[in-house]
Image (cartoon, rainbow, N blue to C red):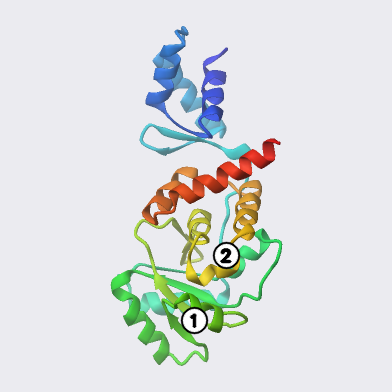
Amino acid sequence: MTASEAILNYAVRQGGIFRRKDLLQEIARQQTDIKASAVTLQINRLIASGSIRRIGHGEYELDNNGLPEFVYLPSEEEKILFMKLKQQFPLLGMCIWTPSVLASFMLHVPDIGYTFLDVEKDGMETVFHFLQEMELGRNILLSPSPTDCERYLTGSDAIVVRQLIGESPLTVVDGCIVPRIEKILVDVIGDNELFFASGSETYNIYEFAFERNRINKSKLLRYASRRNRKEKVEQIIQTIENDQSQ
């Protein structure tokens, strides 16, 4: 077996994510004649070829068979609103998105028309009051309860101000800060405002997302840990993988 084949086989056994240190220990345990320098060389070649990618110091991930990156595309209305808020609060961390993006991953599509503004905790009320003063002709909700969500969000075009959790997976598209797929997938599990995505629909969302898009499991599980949802995320992924292997 070549060094390249050994690396890829090891990566598959680790679920797609691996560390160079662990890989070298595994190779040494197998008492192969592959040297550490050869492993480093092959890792660099696999990165250059797109077979794997570096996701941290000494940490790598398989390319998920060339699946495309998920990109959230904000609407013109979202862009305008976000730019106004960033102009008013340039130092405040926030992102904008609408949960209707989940419709393509669901079997039963609900009537979703509201928009999320995820804002750093200390600025939530300030942004909430600023939105009210803008007189947008939309209901503005601040961290709604489960009852409020079911009562006021179905079929609504409200704006929901929510807390932006630290180290959330985010990216920038057309000047707007929007969520990466990893944030969306973790938020689906337990957020009051995403009540429509509970139960079996959660599994549908994860299954379709992993089939169609490149998911960074390291980012996914790191954010899930920050939200105390890592065990649930791992359980969902394991269930889907078991179903697919049967």
Q: What number is the disc on residue 199? A: none
Q: Evaluate whether residue 215 shows in this view.
A: no
Percent of width and height locating residue 82: 45, 75
Q: Nearer the viewer, residue 85 or 203?
A: 203
Percent of width and height locating residue 187: 48, 61
Percent of width and height locating residue 206: 60, 52
Above or below 129: residue 13: above
Label 2 sits on a secondary structure element that is loop
Q: Residue at x 41, y 52 (%)?
A: 223
Query: In terms of sequence position, does the residue under pointer 2 or pointer 1 come before the other?
Result: 2
Q: Nearer the viewer, residue 8 or 14?
A: 14
Q: Which residue is mark 2?
A: 73
Q: Quadrant of the N terminus?
A: top right
Label 1 sits on a secondary structure element that is helix
Q: Residue at x 38, y 31 (%)?
A: 58
Label 2 crowd bin: few (<14), some (14–19), many (20+), radius 10 Å: some
Q: Residue at x 45, y 15 (%)?
A: 27
The amino acid type, in three-letter code, at marker 2 is: Leu
Percent of width and height locating residue 76: 56, 75
- Name the side, left or right, on which 209 lies relative to 78: right
Q: Which residue is mark 1?
A: 148
Spatial CA distance of label 2 from label 1 is 28 Å
The amino acid type, in three-letter code, at marker 1 is: Asp
Q: Nearer the viewer, residue 142 or 243?
A: 243
Q: Residue at x 51, y 72 (%)?
A: 193
